Image (cartoon, rainbow, N blue to C red):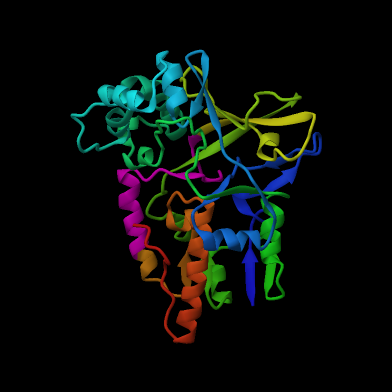
């Protein structure tokens, strides 16, 4: 038997969706979640619990008095520089603007300058990064930018992945279907404390890793989000996500949620302005920062966790990593398989299915 405890009044965590009472729009309550993966097994798994509708994430950015297409692609380049370049010409232009002296970029800014040069970096990434992460781009690892594509064609699909879509009825019904099993008991509005572990044979803990220890070594750094909701008539911005990278605008983006379900029709529209800030005790942690100080603290907590028995740390919070939904699901499936194997062989289950350090 499996017992799932969730301190919130609903299932599905941060991917919780619900109908807005005023407009009927399906809202991603904790910010938008777009499902994308190359993992055929994960795609088959989620589709066994719900119907996924086709959806491609196409992001726009309001910068310098214009609206541009992201990720940076041939249209973005031609519009920004006032050119009509072919792919090979655009590639040569960006190569000429990139700082080739940065052969081994050590931070976000150096990575950006080595890829796209100063103009595009300052227009689309520098201010947005400062607002999103609350620090200078030079303090962030280069790996953050390496995930972002740069294209020399007119493809504005934000993700490369083979499988992309949205659950037709929202993520919460999908998660509820996963949990609808006679061997699973779901207890909502129930907070789990470390002392409660004694009442269970094994605990899969998806809360904050430092929280398991009462943050006695210090708090791992997270960014959290504040949402400013507003209602509009008709179509407010014509797209699901509009970024605002300039420092003259206090929020990072506006999301219009009816565009996440383009197969539905609603006259009213629900939108959210997103404001990023440092996560304080009692806030919902969204993004692990993983700067040098956090990495050192994480290593200390991981070492303690690996000496534990009867608990496995999972998910974005439990492993202090930025994880997309498909990776989280794959690692949960891996952890379940490892647990069954360990149980069958009468061996202890490790503290981490994937080492986060």
Q: How many tags in the picture?
A: 0
Query: Is any atom of residue 30 visible in this view?
Result: yes
Residue closer to the observer: 13 or 70: 70
Position of the C terminus by quadrant: bottom left
Measuring from the top left, give residue 194's x and y in whole percent.
52, 65
Which residues are the magenta region? 277-303
Would you place residue 69 above or below residue 296 in this image?
above
Measuring from the top left, give residue 21's x and y in whole percent.
81, 39
On whether residue 300 falls in the magenta region, the answer is: yes
Q: Residue at x 64, y 59 (%)?
A: 47
* Left or right, 325 with reference to 87: right
Would you place residue 18 above or below residue 90 in this image?
below
Q: Residue at x 35, y 47 (%)?
A: 294
Position of the N terminus by quadrant: bottom right
Q: Quadrant of residue 91?
A: top left
Q: Quadrant of residue 43?
A: bottom right
Measuring from the top left, give residue 216's x and y in whole percent.
41, 55
* Left or right, 279 with reference to 199: left
On whether residue 186 falls in the magenta region, the answer is: no
Measuring from the top left, give residue 273's x and y in whole percent.
61, 29
* Left or right, 97 with reference to 278: left
């Amino acid at each position: 038997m499996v017992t799932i405890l969730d301190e919130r009044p609903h299932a599905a965590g941060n991917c919780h969706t619900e109908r807005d009472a005023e407009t009927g729009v399906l809202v991603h309550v904790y910010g938008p979640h777009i499902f994308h993966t190359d993992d055929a097994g994960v795609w088959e798994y989620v589709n066994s619990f719900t119907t996924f509708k086709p959806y491609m994430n196409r992001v726009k950015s309001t910068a310098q008095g214009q609206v541009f297409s992201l990720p940076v692609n041939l249209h973005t380049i031609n519009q920004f520089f006032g050119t009509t370049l072919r792919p090979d010409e655009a590639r040569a232009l960006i190569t000429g603007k990139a700082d080739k002296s940065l052969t081994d970029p050590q931070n976000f800014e150096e990575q950006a300058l080595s890829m796209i040069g100063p103009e595009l970096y300052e227009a689309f990434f520098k201010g947005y990064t400062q607002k999103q992460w609350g620090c200078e781009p030079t303090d962030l690892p280069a790996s953050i930018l390496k995930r972002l594509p740069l294209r020399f064609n007119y493809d504005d699909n934000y993700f490369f992945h083979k499988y992309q879509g949205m659950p037709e009825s929202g993520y919460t019904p999908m998660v509820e279907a996963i949990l609808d099993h006679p061997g699973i008991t779901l207890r909502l509005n129930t907070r789990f404390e470390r002392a409660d572990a004694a009442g269970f044979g094994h605990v899969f803990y998806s809360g904050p890793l430092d929280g398991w220890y009462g943050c006695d070594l210090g708090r791992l750094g997270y960014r959290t989000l504040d949402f400013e909701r507003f209602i509009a008539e008709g179509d407010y911005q014509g797209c699901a996500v509009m970024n605002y990278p300039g420092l003259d605008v206090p929020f990072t983006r506006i999301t219009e949620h009816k565009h996440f379900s383009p197969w539905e029709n609603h006259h009213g529209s629900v939108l959210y302005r997103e404001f990023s800030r440092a996560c304080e005790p009692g806030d919902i942690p969204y993004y692990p920062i993983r700067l040098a100080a956090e990495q050192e603290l994480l290593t200390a907590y991981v070492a303690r966790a690996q000496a534990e028995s009867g608990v496995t740390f999972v998910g974005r919070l439990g492993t202090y990593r930025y994880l997309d939904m498909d990776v989280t699901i794959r690692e949960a499936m891996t952890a379940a398989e490892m647990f069954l194997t360990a149980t069958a062989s009468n061996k202890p289950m490790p503290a981490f299915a994937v080492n986060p350090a």
